[in-house]
Image (cartoon, helix red, strand yellow):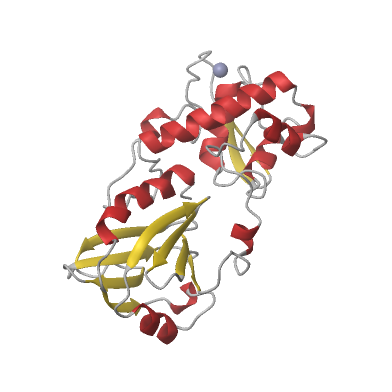
């Protein structure tokens, strides 16, 4: 699933291409993508409008229109949003096409069809629970060791499941959580409330570093993810544990292990992470 660095990379690659262009036509190939409007409402609302800004919050992309209304897209498992020259052949699993002037097309291709799109006319995010309740993001100034401590305090749930909770930390997902815990030397199954302040500070530092590097290397392509130009990311070359069960830990030479926590695979080194 695209996480914060991937969605931020999509935002950065798309924004300069799509802003200020006039929307000529919109085609919805998978109407269930639309969460709070009909196909005809979306098509007629977008007609002749322009995007003036492309924002991101957590794993959501927020495209602001010249009217002030916003399109809010979550790519979920397999969504790919790219800006392409007009007229390329339609790919299988194309959910949405927004045709713009200057021969550009914004296209959403989504194999698993879990992506969601909201058209918001009102301010705030009340209509989208995941956005309305989202916690601070790793690179926000509010994400401090003290904030992380408050999230973990008293929790019997694993530290991994606490830091994946989007209400506590916005945008962190499975890949970057595993990499952060590895760098911090913390076992992902350790109860959140049992971490010492020293461990919390290490985890805080490693979460920020991993997210920054993820953005710098333009995201991680494990299966489906591509940026707004259709290019793969580069952070998969730098992963140390995620997806590496049985491979050698760079720290100690022992094999990387995998366990299930809260229904998700967690990759870790049983020797380096305690
Ligand atoms: Zn190790």
Number of marks drawn: 0
Relative height, residue 14 to residue 143 (above, below)? below
Image quadrant occupied by the C terminus: top right
Q: Position of residue 247 (x, y in %)?
A: 47, 25
- Ligand 1 image-quadrant field: top right
- 257 or 175, nearer to the observer: 175
Judge from the rendering whether residue 38 lies leftward or rightward of residue 83; answer left or right: right
Residue 174, percent from left and from top: 55, 42
What residue sits 48% from the left and 20% below the top?
248
The part of the image, by quadrant, that contains residue 257 is top right
Q: Is residue 55 above or below residue 246?
A: below
- Quadrant assignment, res 78: bottom left
Residue 268 appears in the figure = no
- Tell me which residue sits at (75%, 36%) in the image: 150
Q: Is residue 231 left or right of residue 185?
A: left
Q: Position of residue 6 (x, y in %)?
A: 42, 46
Q: Looking at the image, which residue is at 30% across and 72% down?
A: 98
Q: Residue at x 33, y 78 (%)?
A: 27
Residue 141 visible in the snapshot? yes
Along the line of sight, which residue is nearer the eye, 47 or 249? Answer: 47
Q: How far across and how far down the image is residue 221, in percent? A: 38, 43
Q: Classify 25 as above or below 72.
A: below
């Amino acid at each position: 699933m695209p996480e914060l660095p991937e969605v931020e990379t999509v935002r950065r690659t798309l924004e300069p291409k799509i802003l200020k262009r006039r929307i000529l036509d919109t085609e919805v190939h998978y109407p269930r993508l639309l969460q709070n409007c009909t196909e005809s409402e979306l098509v007629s609302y977008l007609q002749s409008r322009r995007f003036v800004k492309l924002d991101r919050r957590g794993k959501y992309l927020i495209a602001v229109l010249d009217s002030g209304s916003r399109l809010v897209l979550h790519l979920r498992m397999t969504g790919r949003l790219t800006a392409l020259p007009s007229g390329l052949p339609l790919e299988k699993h194309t959910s949405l096409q927004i045709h713009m002037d200057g021969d550009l097309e914004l296209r959403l291709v989504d194999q698993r069809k879990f992506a969601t799109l909201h058209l918001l006319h009102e301010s705030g995010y009340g209509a989208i629970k995941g956005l309305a309740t989202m916690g601070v993001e790793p690179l926000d100034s509010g994400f401090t060791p003290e904030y992380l401590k408050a999230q973990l305090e008293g929790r019997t749930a694993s530290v991994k499941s606490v830091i994946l909770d989007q209400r506590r930390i916005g945008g962190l997902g499975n890949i970057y959580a595993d990499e952060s815990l590895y760098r911090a030397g913390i076992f992902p199954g350790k109860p959140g409330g049992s971490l010492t302040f020293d461990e919390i500070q290490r985890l805080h530092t490693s979460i920020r570093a991993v997210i920054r590097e993820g953005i710098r290397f333009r995201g991680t392509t494990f299966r489906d993810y591509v940026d707004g130009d259709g290019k793969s990311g580069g952070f998969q070359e730098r992963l140390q544990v995620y997806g590496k069960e049985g491979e050698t830990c760079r720290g100690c030479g022992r094999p990387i292990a995998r366990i299930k926590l809260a229904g998700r695979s967690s990759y870790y080194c049983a020797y380096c992470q305690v």
